[in-house]
Amino acid sequence: MLRLLSLPYVYGVLFITLIWRKPTYTHNFKPPFWEIAQLIGGNRHMLFDIIGNILLLFPLGFFLPIWFRKADKPKKVVLICFFVSVAIEITQLITTRGYFETDDLLHNTIGALMGALLGCSLAKQLYTDNKKTQKK
């Protein structure tokens, strides 16, 4: 059931990162920490972008340990989410529907870590309770 509920989330991520964006027809890379530099320079819009990128993969980090028992450690979940983020950035670069931003990789991974810490803790309780119920 939870896996079915993930379909709207996956569509939402694809919509936000690729479908909704118009192609620029240029392949652009942004230098590391450019968003933070912009934020320090007074561009408050960057705070929205940073928070949005943190929130983007938070649900994935949270739900992976619940969906898959083998994703039982935050380190595993974060690694998977990092590669999802890399795939998104490469796809944006290839399709020219966004920039390849190392900042996004960092912020997505931070969000995934936050979600993984909560999700792994919850999954551990769920799987432990499930084992106890099966033994009875």
Image (spheres, rainbow, N blue to C red):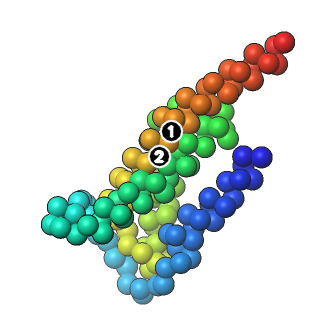
**Residue at the image point whose x is 37% and y is 79% from the top:** 27
Vertical arrangement, residue 34 with respect to residue 66, above or below: below
Return the residue found at the far bottom.
25
Vertical comparison of 103 with 24: above or below: above
The image shows residue 121 at horizontal and vertical percentages of: 55, 29
Q: Secondary structure at mark 2?
A: helix
Q: Which mark is residue 116?
A: 1
**Residue at 60% from the left image edge and 37% from the top image edge:** 65
Image coordinates of residue 107 in percent, x first then y, are 37, 53
| Amino acid, disc 2 | Ala
Q: Determine if residue 120 is in view.
A: yes
Q: Indicate the quadrant containing the C terminus: top left, top right, bottom left or bottom right.
A: top right
User: Is residue 38 in view?
Assistant: no
Q: Is residue 100 left or right of residue 63?
A: left
Give coordinates of residue 122: x percent, y percent: 59, 31
Q: Secondary structure at mark 1?
A: helix
- Between marks 2 and 1, how big is the CA–CA gap? 6 Å
User: Is 33 left or right of 123, judged from the image as shown?
Assistant: left
Q: Are discs 2 and 1 less than 8 Å apart at CB?
A: yes
> Compared with residue 107, is residue 114 higher up or lower down, i.e. above or below?
above
Outermost residue, left side = 41
Residue in view at x 34 percent, y 76 percent: 28
Categorize mark 1 by other alpha carbons within 10 Å: few (<14), some (14-19), many (20+): many
The residue at which mark 2 appears reads as 112
Please tell me in which quadrant of the rendered image residue 14 appears: bottom right
